[in-house]
Amino acid sequence: MVRVTYGAPRHKKKVRYFKQARGFRGGRSRLWRTVRESVVRSWAYAYRDRRQKKRQFRRLWILRINAATRMRGANYSTFMDGLKKAGVELNRKQLSELAIHEPAAFDALVEKAKAARS
């Protein structure tokens, strides 16, 4: 019986994995078994973190908006409620950018939100 090793396809697969593991330290980029484990784990982290990135950015935007509104005598929840009542449809990313780069425009939004709440 002939022993089949799948030489060319096996080599091609290994090359793909080693290419993915470039930049890993030590055996994680040189030893086949460790490379395979590391690459598969890195795919899992990448999948998870593509979703976590969205959550983390939203948290950052909310944090920035809250800080900016507190500097102007309000807080995040009342500010967002006032904007909703005033019919302003800006998302959190846009609001945080306004708070950083256009303080005058953000001041106007805070006043509009305060007026809509009272």
Image: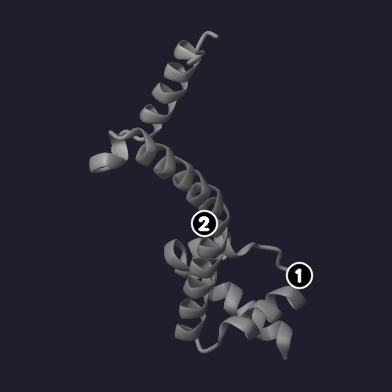
| Residue, far left | 26
Give the mark count. 2
Q: Name the residue nearer the viewer: 23 or 16.
A: 16
Place of residue 57 in the rendered image (x, y in percent of width and height, measured from the top left)? 51, 61
Residue 77 circle label: none
Specify few, some or many for label 2: CA neighbours under 10 Å numbering under 14, 14-19, or 20 or more: few
Residue holding disc 1: 87
**110 sits to left or right of 39:** right
Task: Give the position of the C terminus as an image quadrant.
Answer: bottom right
Task: Give the position of the N terminus as an image quadrant.
Answer: top right
User: Which residue is pictured at 54% across the width and 59% down the height?
Assistant: 52
Residue holding disc 2: 53
Place of residue 35 in the rendered image (x, y in percent of width and height, measured from the top left)? 37, 37
Place of residue 4 in the rendered image (x, y in percent of width and height, measured from the top left)? 51, 13
**74 sits to left or right of 114:** left
Q: Amino acid at mark 2?
A: Lys
User: Which residue is pictured at 47% across the width and 23% down the height?
Assistant: 13
Q: Are marks 1 and 2 in contact (CB under 8 Å)?
A: no
Q: Amino acid at mark 1?
A: Gly
